[in-house]
Amino acid sequence: MKVLAWLCAALVALSAPAVSAAGKDDSFPIDRVLGKADAPITIIEYASTTCGHCATFHKGTLPEVKKNWIDTGKAKLVYRDFPTGPAGLSIGASMIAHCAGPERYFGVLGLIMDQQDKWLGSKDPLDALKKTVRLAGLTGEDVDACLQRQDLFQGIQTRAEHGHEQFKIDSTPSFVVNGKLVVGAKSYEDFNKILTEAGK
């Protein structure tokens, strides 16, 4: 996966990788989970922060899935990064969400997805991302330090490669619902049917 110039520059000084002051996460491979660990239905989502269809799912379908399935204990969602498109931007934005720390991860990821059109279409995407995540308490210095984390950069790549090898993931968003591959950003109605069938 090629990275854009700004991400390359951020990854140059790696002799002593910096850690975001906003939160440290040393667990790899990286998974972020919404919901109860013992939920009977497992939704594994492979998504990219620069994927328009992923943003559509996060803004439209996921809130209803969360309310009706995740918050009620019937399902849990495991989020896994699968960078696509401008890979440098995608990985960079994913890294920033992880550096927010486990408790704030989904809030920052949601913010990045919600504001995707604005920062992705900006003349200076990194600066726009910094302004976006500032709303979640991440400073520009936090972001700069985060983008120096080679372990995080490699962890995201490794997780994506594993998804391709294990589940044949090659596009986003893709979901593995109790072992069954589901491709594409589904409406809540369609996703609800998939989850209902998985729960039988």
Image (cartoon, helix red, strand yellow):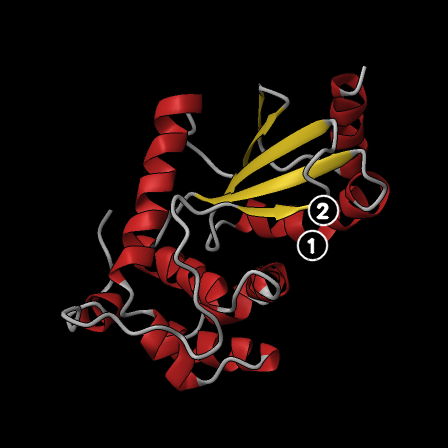
Nearer-the-camera pick, 107 or 169 = 107
Q: Report the amino acid beneath label 2.
A: Leu
Height in image: 145 above or below 84? below
Q: Quadrant for the C terminus, please.
A: top right
Nearer-the-camera pick, 76 or 171 = 76
Q: Report the amino acid beneath label 1.
A: Lys
Please tell me in which quadrant of the rendered image residue 115 appears: bottom right
Q: Mark 2 and 1 residues: CB-CB less than 8 Å, in contact?
A: yes
- Residue 27 position in % (x across, y down): 41, 51
- Residue 137 position in % (x across, y down): 57, 81
- Residue 46 position in % (x across, y down): 50, 39
Closer to the camera: disc 2 or disc 1? 2
- Tag of residue 62: 2
Mark 2, Cα crowd under 10 Å, few <14 / some 14-19 / many 20+, is many
Identify which residue is drawn at 49% across, 49% down: 51
- Mark 1 highlights which residue? 59
- Tag of residue 139: none
Viewer can see residue 58: yes
